Image (cartoon, helix red, strand yellow):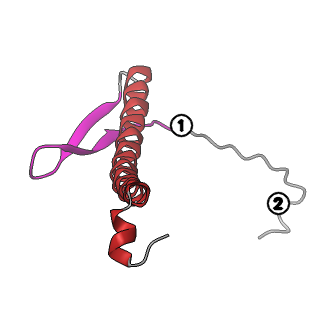
């Protein structure tokens, strides 16, 4: 079929297969990287959506945004206050008051 390597590369079918393989690899690499970046962005958007829903459900919560040096929001501080009330009582029966003295 082919007497030398250069002659085989000159064959149109071999050239098409090699070109297809190279194109497939670089396209796969590009779309894999783009998909990974999209997954990260989707995770951040999901966290933001959860935070927005929490803020809508708790309008009395004190909320403060934490920002990095570029001004992007990197976190949220939520302050909450709680009140507690308690009481206690004790009862006893004295059988012999002189015995304890």
Residue 49 visible to the viewer: yes
Q: How many marks?
A: 2
Tell me which corner region of the image, top left, top right, bottom left or bottom right, holds residue 101. bottom right
Q: Secondary structure at mark 1?
A: loop
Frontmost residue, 95 versus 61:
61
Residue 80 visible to the viewer: no
Residue extending farthest to the bottom is 4
Residue of label 2: 97
Residue 96's spot in the image, x, y percent?
A: 88, 60
Q: Residue at x 72, y 47 (%)?
A: 90
Between circles 1 and 2, the one closer to the viewer is 1
Q: Residue at x 60, y 40 (%)?
A: 87
Q: Is residue 62 magenta?
A: yes
Give the CA distance from mark 1 to mark 2.
Answer: 35 Å
Horizontally, residue 74 falls left or right of residue 42, namely left
Residue 70's spot in the image, x, y percent?
A: 9, 48
Residue 47's spot in the image, x, y percent?
A: 40, 38
Mark carried by residue 53: none
Chain part drawn in magenta: 61-84
Frontmost residue, 29 versus 36:
29
Tell me which corner region of the image, top left, top right, bottom left or bottom right, holds residue 10. bottom left
Callout 1 environment at 10 Å: few (<14), some (14 to 19), or many (20+)?
few
Frontmost residue, 30 versus 62:
30
Residue extending farthest to the right is 95
Residue 100's spot in the image, x, y percent?
A: 80, 68
Residue of label 1: 85
């Amino acid at each position: 079929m082919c007497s030398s390597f250069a002659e085989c590369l000159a064959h149109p079918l071999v050239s098409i297969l090699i070109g297809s393989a190279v194109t497939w690899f670089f396209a796969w690499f590009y779309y894999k990287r783009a998909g990974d970046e999209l997954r990260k962005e989707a995770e951040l958007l999901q966290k933001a959506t959860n935070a927005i829903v929490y803020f809508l459900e708790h309008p009395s919560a004190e909320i403060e945004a934490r920002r990095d040096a570029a001004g992007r929001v990197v976190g949220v501080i939520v302050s909450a206050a709680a009140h507690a009330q308690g009481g206690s009582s004790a009862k006893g029966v004295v059988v012999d008051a002189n015995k304890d003295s």
